[in-house]
Image: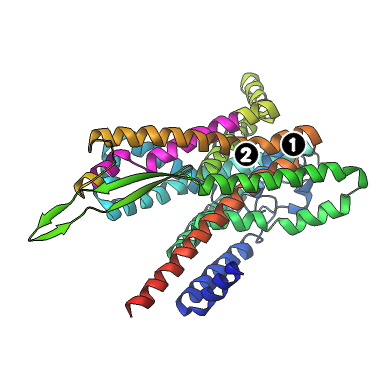
Amino acid sequence: MLAWNKVTQLFRIPELRKKILVVLGLLAVFRIAAIIPVPGVPAESLRSLFAGNQLFGLLDIFSGGGLSKVSILMLGVGPYITASIVMQLMTMIIPRLEEMQKEEGEAGRRKLNQWTRLLAVPLAALQGFAYLNLLQQGAARGGAGFGISFTQWEMIITLVAVTTGTIFLMWLGELITEQGIGNGISLIIFVGIISRLPQATSQIIATWTPDQLFTYGLFLAVSLIVIAGVVLVSEGQRIIPISYARRVRGGQVLGGASTHLPLRVNQAGVIPIIFALSVMLFPGVVANFFVGSQNPQVAQTASWIVNLFQNQLFYGIAYFVLVVAFTYFYTAVTFDPDQIAENVQKQGGFIPGIRPGKRTSEYLKYILNRITLTGAIFLGIIAVLPLAVQGITGISTLTIGGTALLIVVSVVLETMKQIESQLTMREYEGFLR
């Protein structure tokens, strides 16, 4: 009942109603563009190629089905995510970029975002070229029925189209983010995933047999565990008490209040999963590109890499390690204990029993590392849990479904928080009038 009241309240406020309708309209534009095919490619004949390949399946689910349809949005937001990873790594390595992010404030962040968008363009062109060649080689290995072959001019035109599609998606994502109803890129990935639910449901109904009852029951149980785990990790917090010393100014007593600093168990949200998947998919894409090389050593090495990433045990371990590593990495980028300690000290605050300044910073780092370890390991276990279910049941689609479910729940929680903040802000505005 409370949730329904929130929804009705959301649509009663004209400004919020307009924002939601704009976001829904932009997402509808994304879904329409995702079904516009690249000319000259028989997308229908590629279904068997995508159905039997885990790499293609994961790539397709994050492009919202655009890759299997070979649409102009076949790359999805993958190049932008890769560019974000590169820029954040560069920010940690190059002091000038770090200073720009911290000292120049919003202007510095806008400049870094602009550089990220510019970097995404050549990455999209490179990734698009690799995918198109990958489809040609995969189709050639799949048999004569695929009929995929690009001339040099057709390759250039198609490459320009899919690169433009990625730029178009980045623009849509920014327009959605500006509305303040969720993160645009995350919502695009979310809509791309849930758009496949009707098709997946119909396939399950069409192929269901009574002897598969245990299999699908197990998958449902894992799904519920994933949902509960993501909610638990996303909502978990460690409360750090902060007290403010009393000060006398002009006969007035200031300070003396107590507050708290909430440290989330998972500061990074869904970003580590997206980063880890991007890194996991990259070696396979590159290796598949060189499988047909004329050099025997290059072809053999590429085949070995492809087979390595098809190994479920290696894939699961590497996926777990990357999720944990990216959780720490993104937390270090977004949460600076030194800056927090400095701001608390400037405001006359302190943590009881901890000296202000360096000792406060060290204490925050200690607490943050401990709770991040818990959140990162738990998030990694949830991420690889569907792989274990696949090993038991032998159904490859469960891996994709589990990873997608992890992202969907996290994006829903993030969007709900932003909507809640919009409603709270309007409630305070009502008191001020």
In terms of depth relative to the viewer, which is nearer, 5 or 184? 5
Residue 144 in percent (x, y) is at: 81, 42
Question: Is 326 inside the magenta-drawn segment?
Answer: yes
Residue identified by numbered label 2: 382
Q: Quadrant of residue 146?
A: top right
Residue 173 in percent (x, y) is at: 49, 59
* Colour scheme of the rendered structure: rainbow
Local SS, label 2: helix
Residue identified by numbered label 1: 389
Residue 413 in percent (x, y) is at: 55, 55
In terms of depth relative to the viewer, which is nearer, 354 or 26? 354
Mark yes or no: residue 149 visible.
no
Residue sitting at x 58%, y 32%: 320
Question: Is 159 inside the magenta-drawn segment?
Answer: no
Residue 253 in percent (x, y) is at: 15, 58
Q: Does 107 appear above or below 59?
A: below
Q: Look at the image and give the residue range highlighted in magenta.
A: 318-343
In terms of depth relative to the viewer, which is nearer, 153 or 340? 340
Q: Is residue 248 left or right of residue 302?
A: left
Q: Earlier in the sequence, mark 1 or mark 2?
A: 2
Q: Amino acid under label 1?
A: Val
Residue with the most extreme right position: 210
